[in-house]
Amino acid sequence: MVLLAGQTVLITGASSGIGQASAVVFAEAGCRLILLARRLSRLEELAASLKIQYQTECLCLAADVQKQDEIIPTLKSLPQDWQTIDILINNAGLSRGLERFDQASLSDWEEMIDTNIKGLLYVTHTLLPGMLARGQGQIINIGSIAGLQVYPGGHVYCGTKAAVQAITEGLKQDLLGTPIRVSCIDPGLVETEFSQVRFHGDTERAEKVYQGLEPLTGMDVAEVILFCATRPAHVNLNQIILMPTAQASTTRVHREANLD
């Protein structure tokens, strides 16, 4: 296991869910954190908590990864002492809607494509040259089992996560011969704000997604991300798939009637 103390980790989508949990585990590991999301107040609250608990140095950045003219200048204007980024966690992503293809919203499609694909590309393309120049760095992309198995109503979301798979593999191919490591973490059902976002704030519908089973938590996924980051330099975990014990695929889930 490699100790990460003192390394700088940039986490996109850090204001909630897997991103927030990742901030906690990397803070506990002694890292400096660049927390990036749209909701600055949530980031500042998280940073204050990490400062008290772990004495973590945090830089909070309010930016939307899907907006090229916002995210790229933000990353290119980092303070001098925050420009050396050792680990990039491309976590920002979302799903919108679960309608049949012909009934889906074009604006939902655009938001998923712009965030899940373009956002990942903008951030990675901006930060990778620095990693290459320093001869050190790791990129961890958060995918989904939806990128491996399509389900009804998931057409575009599944397509964006399949793109994350392909982009991750393409990066690995292009960076062969360099010390930069590239990995993809693919979770199944994780209970975060994901379903509330998908259903545009319909809490009742979102809660039904996780009824009758014990889903993964953001912390479950964050601990796997940390494991990936702490492998020796000659070890690259190309892909890690994790699901709740009660889930076998995107469409096969075992639910207990008496489990809240």
Image (tube, grey):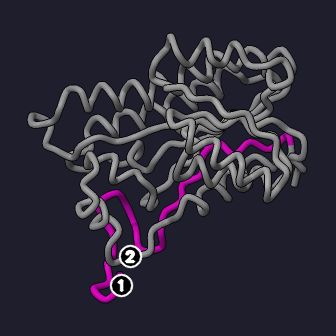
Residue 9: x percent and y percent? 75, 37
Read off the residue under disc 2. 213
Mark positioned earlier in the residue sequence (1 or 2):
2
Could you tell me which residue is drawn at 78 percent across and 17 percent down?
130
**Quarter of the image that includes the N terminus:** bottom right
Please name the residue shown 62% across and 55% down the image.
21
Q: Amino acid at mark 2?
A: Leu
Residue closest to the eye, 168 or 133:
133
Is 214 or 206 nearer to us in this picture? Answer: 206
Q: Which mark is residue 259?
A: 1
Q: Position of residue 247 (x, y in %)?
A: 40, 68
Corner quadrant of residue 58: top right
Is disc 1 placed on a helix, strand or loop? loop
Numbered disc 2: secondary structure: loop
Decide: marks 1, 2 in contact (CB < 8 A)?
A: yes
Q: Residue at x 84, y 27 (%)?
A: 136
Tell me which segment is drawn in magenta.
233-260
Residue 59 versus residue 83 in the image, above or below: below
Residue located 40% across and 40% down the image = 94
Magenta-drawn stretch contains 34: no
Looking at the image, residue 169 sits to the left or right of residue 148; the answer is: right
Residue type at the position of mark 1 = Leu
CA–CA distance in space, label 1 to label 2: 6 Å
Give the side of residue 251 with respect to residue 42, left or right. left
Q: Position of residue 123 (x, y in %)?
A: 59, 22
Residue farthest to the bottom?
258
